[in-house]
Amino acid sequence: MEEIKVKDILKITKGELIIGNPEETCEKYAKDSREVQEGDIYIGIKGEKVNGSQYYEKAFENGAKGCIIQEIEIGETEKQKYKNKTIIKVEDTTKALQQIASYKRSKYNIPVIAITGSVGKTSTKDIVANVVNQKYKTLKTIGNYNNHIGMPLTILNLKQHEAIVLEMGMNHLKEISVLTQIAKPTIAVITNVGTAHIGNLGSRENILKAKLEIIEGLQEGGKIVINNDNDLLHKWYKENFEKYNIITYGIENSSQYMAKDIQSDEKGSKYTLEILDEQKNKSSKKIQIEVPVGGNHFVLNSLCAIAVGKQLNIEDEKIKQGIKEFELSKKRMDISEKNGITIINDSYNANYDSMKAAIEYLAKRPEKRKIAVLGDMLELGEYSKQLHKKVGEEVVKNSINILITVGTEAKNIVQIAKEGGIETIQCDTNEEAIQKLKSIINKGDCILIKASNSMHFDEIVNKI
């Protein structure tokens, strides 16, 4: 393990040592004083409303051995009280966190796979990490730790790891630029360019621009893996294939890694992998692949994992095993059965592209009756009405039996679904949706539950 000491942090951040031993080793880090564990270094992040540094004493009570703070004065009484602890004062704790993470990253000469995209980042991260873990001891992003605070904290968890798979999220331009300069990826992955955060960015072209920021931190000789079926990425590839080392995967457009003869059911998908020999411009190898989750979007995720695995010289059999055995993060296409009813919990987040994919998957399920419980998709700005109506079109096109919605914007889904002859139930609250669901569900039904995370649709999952 590459150690970081207090003296290193002082040098990196230009911080001031209020109390403590410069030779003390700093191994584990936490940003929430309530979640601090014995021996952690607590970083008091200053947010819009609260300065986390004011909770440094709570962190010490919970076992922290050190704290990094800003804008907090430490009196003589506190210095004496915590004389066996470490307190470092910096100008900006968020910047300090990023500087420490960047320093730690620089001490590891390992594969770093960075993944971004409008939809599918987390599920792609999960499957890629499982493939990479077949050969290398792999650290991956946990939960939603994919922003300017979460990603650096993930990097600071590096210990005896031989590879790291990082998820990079963004809401605005220049955010991924910051992340990639910290992570310095050896492989950069872009899963797609859709409509997530289009309200902030104004157009899909700007979303592409934001995603491509990932290349800014790419190490010399690094590779870019893209979903070649995505229209904007396909166009970008055709314009830039001579400039960058780009690896492509897809189902529709000719790519280096392609899925053919796809067979899907409720248990997953099987397909024939064709690997293109670029020199001969023809398929050089055919391998049978099994994906344990249904839907073409998971076929694409698996192709991405194969593309990454091949760049890391992982054996075909180990790649196949990594795909076959991967598990999704919770709340993302989490399929369970309860009292004879199948529940697809995809309540973590939602945008048009992921809604479309989830509805298509629901439609292909073997159950007789399909029920979609859908809520608002957020951060769509002026595009919100249009994109919610497009979700309604998908409900109609896929002949969903019953649509239940919650939310103001979701009323636009209902409008189009009604016009298309779908049975609809419009609710004002999650509790109302729960009661309506309970009154209509029967054994053998399949229910999709999906909305943006702040709609708290996990409440619906937990109560039906």
Image (cartoon, grey):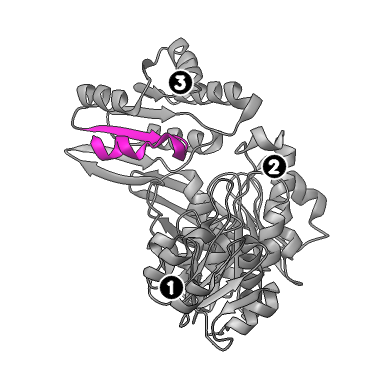
Q: Which of 4 and 68 is in front in this view?
A: 68
361 shown above or below 242: above
- Distance between the Cα atoms at labels 3 and 1? 55 Å
Tell me if residue 434 comes above or below residue 154 in the rendering.
above
Query: Residue sitting at 38 percent across and 73 percent down?
Result: 63
Q: Earlier in the sequence, mark 3 or mark 1?
A: 1
**Secondary structure beneath label 2:** helix
The disc labelled 3 sits on which kind of residue?
A: Val
Question: Disc 1 to disc 2, how far (Cα)?
Answer: 40 Å
Of the image marks 1 and 2, the number of the one nearer the N terminus: 1
Looking at the image, residue 444 sits to the left or right of residue 411; the answer is left
The amino acid at mark 1 is Ala
- Nearer the N terminus, badge 2 or badge 3? 2
Answer with the quarter of the image where residue 282 lies. Answer: bottom right
Residues at circles 1 and 2 in contact by the CB criterion of under 8 Å: no
Instruction: Tell which tag, 3 or 1, sits nearer the viewer.
Output: 1
Q: Check if residue 57 falls in the magenta segment.
A: no
Q: Name the residue under label 1.
A: 64
What residue did someone put label 2 on? 207
The residues colored magenta run 444-464
Relative placement, left or right, of 434 versus 403 is left
Q: Residues within 10 Å of mark 3 (few under 14, many from 20)?
A: many
Residue lying at 43% horizontally and 73% vertically, measured from the top left: 64
* Secondary-structure class at tag 1: loop
Going by the numbered disc 2, the residue's amino acid type is Ile
Expressed as whole percent of the image width and height from the top left, the position of residue 99 reads 66, 69
Q: Can residue 82 be seen in this view?
A: no
Front tag of 2 and 3: 2
On residue 396, the disc is 3
User: Which of the 4 quarters of the picture holds residue 38?
Assistant: bottom left
Q: How crowded is mark 2: few (under 14 residues within 10 Å), some or many (20 or more)?
A: many
